[in-house]
Amino acid sequence: MNINSDGCRSASERFEAIYKKPPEFTAFTPYRVCPIGAHSDHQLGKVTGFAIDKGIYMAYGKKMNGVVEISSLQFQKRAQWHILSVPPERQGDWADHLRGATIALGERYPLFVGICAVVCGELPIGGLSSSAAIIITFLTSLCRLNGISLSERELIGIAKEAENRYVGVACGKLDQSCEVYCRKDNLLYLDTLDDSYELIPAAPSMKPFEIAVFFSGLERSLVGSKFNMRVDECRSAAYALKALSGMEYGKFEDTNLRDVPYEVYLRYRDRLPENWAKRAEHWYTEYQRVEAGAEAWRKGDLFGFGKLSFESGYSSVHNWETGSPELIKLYDIMTHTDGIYGGRFSGAGFKGCCMALIDPAYEEDILEKVGGEYLSAFPGLKGKYSAHICRTSDGVEF
């Protein structure tokens, strides 16, 4: 963690202003981007990802009475609960992710010590897995205060459970895995079926790259979006394909497209409702793009990798049918901007941002062209739209 970062200083200064003493500890979890492999993990697909050098900072200390007291520099309301008495249902505010994390951790390990903390997110909310990052930051901090040592897989599972069970988002393991497993200048290539993964280093022959993040100026919440509906449409397609082909099937919630061979999909896709067929088409072709992308990265073929990322974005628009007019416009601008190797929506794609792999030599021109064209199309978002240049990073240290 960069102790001298603005985010860390801001969180520490606010902590000292509230509690009249310096924080005992600081923690950091990076955000993530997924260049290829979107909308795949919840159906046990394969994904790629990078952690980036921006994320969530937390300044914190002990609360020996077991109280959890959290403030955020991005939200006004301070949240408070007891580690042994968390509201059983979500409260509808930003801290629900942390309430869910407290319950999930407390079901596995005894908790005695509470926490007082201030959280600071470095970039605007939406598309970079800020929810997973804040959960992981909180979990690693609460574990430190209570003498709990989690494995990487445990940390990922508990963080995912907090979103699935308490917050109600049917997400997979992509976000949490990137924020834990990733290493600087390596592509994470993860199979969410069995959690096997590979860190593929950038080849010596690979052209230089940076990661540009373009925020649309619109924030989003996955709970209120069509994210869960898309997941159900995938499961419905898988369930129907199993029935049509005579495969055995069990509970709906345990059904995934990964269970159904691609050949079965090709044979019966014309008998699926149109929306179900589109969701399945995205999932199967995205699976193939991830495998091809991993090989392109291994060979140092940044142009080939970027092309696959653009194709992933196209499928997200036309098969997954996500993307606000603003995000689609950003994506379209990216596809005809010199110096951008590839890119797509980042995150669920209902609002939020786009990410792109760019040639650093074109950085200034890219920022000017993308921002100029976007704000010409949506002038009302001036002052809300923003662009940021990032680099790859290690995952969380704990």
Image (cartoon, rainbow, N blue to C red):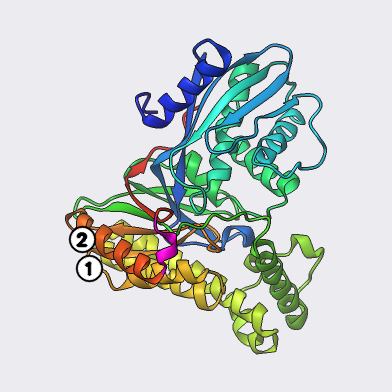
Q: Is residue 380 on the magenta stretch?
A: yes
Q: In which quarter of the image is residue 255?
A: bottom right
Sequence order check, earlier mark of 1 and 2: 1
Q: Residue furthest front?
A: 380
Q: Which residue is drawn at 70% across and 49% down?
A: 164
Label pair 1/2, CB-CB below 8 angstroms: yes
Q: Where is residue 344 in the image (x, y as percent from the top left)?
A: 42, 64
* Residue matched to label 1: 338
Q: Nearer the viewer, residue 82 or 210?
A: 82
Q: Which residue is drawn at 62% across and 24% down?
A: 142
Mark 2 Cα within 10 Å, few/some/many (few <14, many 20+)? some
Answer above or below: position of 28 versus 23.
below
Q: Residue at x 54, y 31 (%)?
A: 119
Across the whole image, how many numbered discs are drawn on residues?
2
SS for dot 2: helix
Res. 388 mark: none
Answer above or below: position of 290 versus 154.
below
Q: Where is residue 153 in the image (x, y as percent from the top left)?
A: 59, 38
* Residue matched to label 2: 365
Residue 66 visible in the displayed image: yes
Quadrant where the image shows the N terminus: top left
> What's under tag 2, amino acid-wise?
Asp
Residue 300 visible in the displayed image: no
